[in-house]
Image: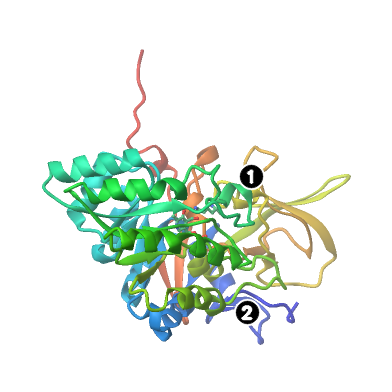
Amino acid sequence: MSQRQFPHSCHLNDQNQTLHLEDCNLQTVAETFGTPAYVYSRAALTDAYQAFADTLAAHPAGQDGLVCFAVKANSNLGVLSLFAQLGSGFDIVSGGELARVLAAGGNPKKVVFSGVGKTEEEMIAALNAGILCFNVESASELDRLSTVAARIGKRAPISLRVNPDVDAKTHPYISTGLKENKFGVPITDALALYRHAASLPAIEVTGIDCHIGSQLLDPSPFVEALERILPLVDTLKAEGIHLHHIDLGGGLGIYYHEGQTEPVVADYLRPLLDRLTGRGLRVLLEPGRRLVGNAGVLLTKVEYLKHGEDKHFAIVDAAMNDLARPALYEAWHDIVPVKPHNGEARTYDIVGPVCETGDFLGQARPMALQQGDLLAVLSAGAYGMVMSSNYNTRPRAAEVLIDGDKTHLVRERETVASLYAGEKTIQF
Ligand SMILES: Cc1ncc(COP(=O)(O)O)c(C=O)c1O
Ligand SMILES: N[C@@H](CCCC[NH3+])C(=O)O
């Protein structure tokens, strides 16, 4: 057990053989804040951000580059404020995310707005905030944005999100850059749409954008996508449409399995930056998962052990409503005891209390367990809390940010009463 590799900042403490995140004993964290609880490491978040920022800064094509953290991966205010303090920008996909970024002290001039379904209200909020760029995903969105901006006396900075029709070789639900996906405008339509955009007085064409998918462990599709886009940039230039920036999206994968290797940030970025050298384009990136995924764990307590004829179940107090990824994508998360002990090891399905057979966090996991044990679901910092729900009227988990030996409660656990605040009964 002590030989195993843990995600960044997570380790078994030598003295008491208890899982720690930075210098905090996760057993104590669970006792203090209760379970289920998401726990994030400031050091791991910072290191992950710096890997991108430092690689950009070290390359001639990346000097004025900007990392725009994809807020959809983790929108906790404590996490967002840390990234804002590190100098990060933000990639948002809703008015709600914009509000969170602003509440966390994010700079609107470093915000890009992605998403296929921007409403008028969201456009107005973003225009009034003065964001860096709208990543426009369709002709009808462009026309709506132009109308809305003109109506309120603003000019909307835009890039078109082009869909380069590249296979990201990832889970089909999180692949976005194929022509059958709903995202972006087909690269073959982009030139005509850019011409149209350039003719609209309330629109300022500033960039080009693409995002081909998520959890890419092989970075070669990123290069393929860029190589499909650069000829379009050249054609636009020849027509007098000069772009200021290129947004390469997010999508770099992380390891979820012990022993799995993940691409090194610099190895992913350098071939892209090399191809952009001398073009005078500012580079924007939208990493989500890679900045937060392995900076967080989900702590959960074993409520019951249930030994069936064919299977052993560990029924824990976290469920698919807290972490949807296993139920939704059959995604794998390593799950480890916070304080391993030497009881009889059995092969457990780690399941939650929700009334669905798909409510599992992990299946067929060998470990020695007792009722009351604490488990840590690893690599849970991305698409964890943000995808949680109140299904089965379960209050959502607390979120805690670790900084060395200090803990900060960055989101309180919901209460049962808060779950129906704002609702009314009615007498017929
Ligand atoms: C437009 C856009 N940008 C950035 C991201 C972040 O992706 P990831 O978390 O894989 O880095 C996504 C999600 O896939 C996205 O749709
Ligand atoms: N929710 C997905 C990632 C979605 C990426 C968003 N474009 C996951 O948990 O892996």
Q: Quadrant of the C terminus?
A: top left
Furthest toward the top, the residue is 428
| Residue 408 pos. (x, y %) | 40, 70
Callout 1: 10 Å neighbours few (<14), some, many (20+)? some
Q: Nearer the viewer, residue 305 or 173?
A: 173
Label 2 amino acid? His
In the image, 287: left or right of 113?
Answer: right
- The residue depicted at 79 percent of the width and 65 percent of the height is 368
| Measured Cα–Cα span from mark 1 to mark 2 | 28 Å
* Residue 167 found in image quarter: bottom right
Label 1 amino acid? Pro
Residue 308 visible at all = yes
Q: Which mark is residue 11?
A: 2
| Ligand 2 contact, mark 2 (Cβ < 8 Å) | no
In the image, 307: left or right of 391?
Answer: right
Q: Earlier in the sequence, mark 1 or mark 2?
A: 2
Furthest toward the left, the residue is 153
Location of mark 1 (residue): 353
